[in-house]
Amino acid sequence: MPTFIIGGRFSHILQNKLQEVAELIPNCEFVTIEDAGQFVHDTNLSDFLAVLKNFLDS
């Protein structure tokens, strides 16, 4: 099953830790949204929707 992890650059969760988790999950894609925090969809909805649409279309 394809899995998608989206992280916000300014989240308290370190992006390298999310990358490590993504590497442990088969068929997983990880994306960092630069202008976002913990709640990516609240702080940068347009970029969140763009990367989500790209994932769903692939």
Image (spheres, helix red, strand yellow):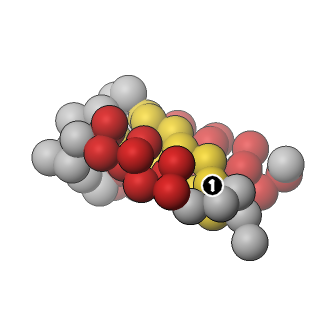
The image position of residue 49, as x and y in percent, is 59, 49
Residue 45 or 17: which is nearer the viewer? Answer: 17
What's the amino acid at mark 1? Cys
Please indicate, yes or no, whether residue 1 appears anywhere in the rendered image. yes
The outermost residue toward the right is 58
Q: Residue at x 74, y 44 (%)?
A: 54
Image quadrant in which you'd find residue 44: top left
The outermost residue toward the top is 34
The image position of residue 34, as x and y in percent, is 38, 27
The outermost residue toward the left is 12
Q: Residue at x 72, y 64 (%)?
A: 2
Q: Residue at x 42, y 42 (%)?
A: 19
Q: Is residue 29 left or right of residue 13?
A: right
Q: Is residue 34 above or below residue 31?
A: above
The image position of residue 24, as x and y in percent, is 51, 57
Q: Residue at x 65, y 60 (%)?
A: 26
Residue at which label 1 appears: 28
Please indicate, yes or no, whether residue 5 appears anywhere in the rendered image. no
Q: Is residue 17 left or right of residue 25?
A: left
